[in-house]
Image: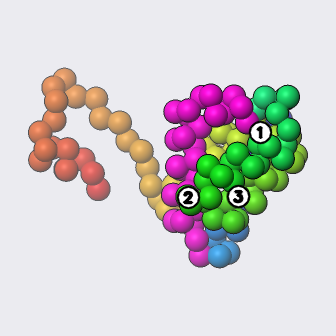
């Protein structure tokens, strides 16, 4: 159920990004938020804590991300909070980022080498 909800929210913001011609902007903003939630586990725990009021959660996000996030992204976060989907937030962000990469034909590759690669070898891997 959580994956279905994550996909639904991610698809909505993805379609909005395409419609507004802001895919790169939204991708940058949501990648920032996703990385922050992954790194700052205390912030994510605060956002998912049931005793923290919804308005308080949104106020914290608005203050923390006002400079990094557009009104559309803040609106998405507000809807996620209002619909009690805070626990799905990282999945929503990750799903959006995967959709964005797929749309732009971006693939993440991992190179496993028996020795460290030289600068020239690293550059030859990047296409």
Q: Residue at x 44, y 55 (%)?
A: 106
Alpha-carbon span between mark 2 and mark 3: 10 Å
Figure quadrant of residue 67 = bottom right
Examine the rendering and report whether any part of residue 15 can be seen: no
The image position of residue 3, as x and y in percent, is 75, 38
- The structure residue drawn at horizontal position 12% and vertical position 47%, both measured from the top left corner, is 120
Element carrying mark 1? helix
Magenta-colored span: 21-47
Percent of width and height locating residue 5: 80, 44
Residue ID at (37%, 41%):
109
Determine whether the residue tagged by mark 2 lies in a helix, strand or loop: loop
Few, some or many residues within 10 Å of mark 1 (<14, 14–19, 20+): many
Mark whose residue sits in front, 2 or 1: 2
Which one is earlier in the sequence, the residue at label 2 or at label 1?
Answer: 2
Name the magenta segment's main secondary structure.
helix
Which residue is under mark 3?
74
Q: Residue beneath label 1, please?
A: 86
Residue 49: horizontal and vertical position, in percent?
A: 78, 29
**Marking on residue 68:** 2
Q: How many labels were placed on the picture?
A: 3
Nearest the viewer among 23 and 78 is: 78
Viewer-proximal residue, 21 or 82? 82
Among the 4 quarters of the image, the one containing residue 116: top left
Left or right: where does residue 62 sit relative to residue 35? right
């Amino acid at each position: 159920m959580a994956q279905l909800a994550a996909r639904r929210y991610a698809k909505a913001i993805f379609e909005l990004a395409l419609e507004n011609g802001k895919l790169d902007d939204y991708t940058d903003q949501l990648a920032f938020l996703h990385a922050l939630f992954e790194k700052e586990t205390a912030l994510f725990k605060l956002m998912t804590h049931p005793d923290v009021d919804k308005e308080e959660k949104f106020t914290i996000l608005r203050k923390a991300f006002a400079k990094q996030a557009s009104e559309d992204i803040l609106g998405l976060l507000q809807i996620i909070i209002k619909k009690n989907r805070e626990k799905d937030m990282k999945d929503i962000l990750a799903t959006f980022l995967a959709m964005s990469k797929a749309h732009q034909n971006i693939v993440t590759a991992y190179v496993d080498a028996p020795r460290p690669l030289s600068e020239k070898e690293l550059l030859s891997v990047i296409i």
